[in-house]
Image (cartoon, grey):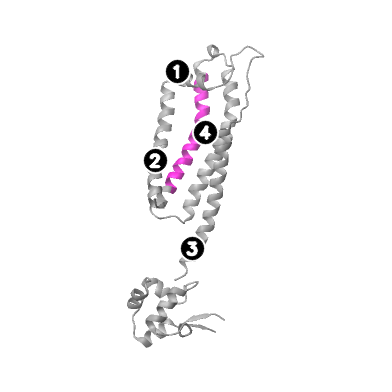
């Protein structure tokens, strides 16, 4: 049982590049890459809010529990 | 003033004792008469100064050099910590080591300073007639303050360890 990050799926659906999303939400590309691969300990609400705003999605679209 | 600016200022300020203390000790080694004069003025001991030979002044000079060197080592480490702080490099274990070394230097220096007065009194009264030799023990508020400040810096180092852990954890959040 773990938290799955589906950010790359949503990004490919929206056809947005990592570089562009990172710039729009104000984090570095390496950090976005770590987030996409689920190699971070946590995500700030502020970052999550910006991602949802840019990708026009819900937090549940990005994060899943399985 | 920001942490960077203050640390940068302290980094350069600490250069003064790091240069002045060795220069002063070096001067006293070359001019042992001035060291003798300083000892006569500052030591509240019933020493018969006319019985003190020059080798005794050199010995006392060597004894007092030890805490001075320890304090210098502490200040050197504190300066390195401030150098890191001035570069915004605050939360790392190397800085904890620097602060711990400074704290240890203060604590050791305070303890050594209280041991030095008995040693100095024995050395200076070696040529006194039998029964008039002196063993003086003194505790000054300055030594206690130095010890207490050392303990405070030790606690700050421990707090910095916890701050490092928080910083590391925070870096793992995006």
- Dot 4 and dot 2 within a common chain: yes
Disc 3 target residue: B168
Kindly identify which numbered label has been placed on residue B67: 4
Counting the numbered discs, the total is 4
- CA separation in Å, label 4 and label 2: 21 Å
- Say whether disc 4 or disc 1 marks the residue closer to the N-terminus: 1
Q: Is disc 4 in contact with disc 1, using a CB cutoff of under 8 Å?
A: no
- Say whether disc 4 or disc 2 marks the residue closer to the N-terminus: 2
Few, some or many residues within 10 Å of mark 2 (<14, 14–19, 20+): few
Q: Is residue A23 visible?
A: yes
Image mark 1: chain: B
Residue B161's place in the image compared with B79, above or below, is below
- Say whether disc 1 or disc 3 marks the residue closer to the N-terminus: 1
Q: Secondary structure at mark 1?
A: helix
- In the image, which is nearer the foreground, mark 4 or mark 2? 2
Disc 1 target residue: B33
Which of the pair B76/B39 is nearer the observer? B39
Few, some or many residues within 10 Å of mark 1 (<14, 14–19, 20+): few
- CA separation in Å, label 2 and label 3: 31 Å
- CA separation in Å, label 1 and label 3: 56 Å
- Dot 4 and dot 3 within a common chain: yes
Disc 2 target residue: B13
Few, some or many residues within 10 Å of mark 4 (<14, 14–19, 20+): many
Residue A9 lies, in percent from the top left, at 41, 85
Magenta highlight range:
B56-81
Kindly identify which numbered label has been placed on residue B102: none
User: Any magenta on residue B172?
Assistant: no
């Amino acid at each position: 049982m773990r938290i799955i990050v589906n950010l790359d799926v949503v990004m490919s659906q929206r056809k947005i590049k990592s570089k562009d999303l990172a710039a729009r939400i104000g984090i570095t590309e390496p950090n976005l890459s770590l987030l996409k691969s689920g190699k971070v300990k946590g995500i700030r609400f502020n970052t999550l809010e910006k991602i949802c705003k840019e990708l026009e999605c819900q937090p549940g679209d990005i994060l899943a529990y399985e | 003033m920001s942490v960077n600016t203050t640390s940068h200022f302290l980094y350069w300020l600490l250069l003064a004792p790091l240069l002045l203390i060795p220069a002063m000790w070096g001067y006293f080694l070359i001019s042992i008469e001035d060291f003798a004069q300083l000892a006569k003025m500052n030591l509240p001991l019933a020493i018969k100064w006319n019985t003190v030979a020059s080798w005794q002044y050199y010995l006392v000079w060597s004894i007092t050099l030890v805490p001075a060197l320890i304090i210098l080592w502490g200040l050197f480490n504190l300066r390195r910590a401030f150098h890191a702080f001035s570069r915004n490099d605050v939360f790392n274990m190397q800085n904890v080591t620097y602060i711990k070394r400074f704290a240890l230097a203060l604590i050791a220096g305070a303890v050594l300073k209280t041991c030095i007065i008995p040693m100095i009194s024995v050395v200076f009264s070696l040529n006194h007639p039998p029964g008039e030799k002196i063993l003086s023990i003194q505790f000054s508020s300055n030594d206690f303050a130095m010890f207490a400040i050392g303990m405070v810096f030790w606690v700050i180092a421990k707090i910095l360890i916890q701050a490092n852990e928080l910083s590391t954890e925070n870096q793992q959040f995006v």
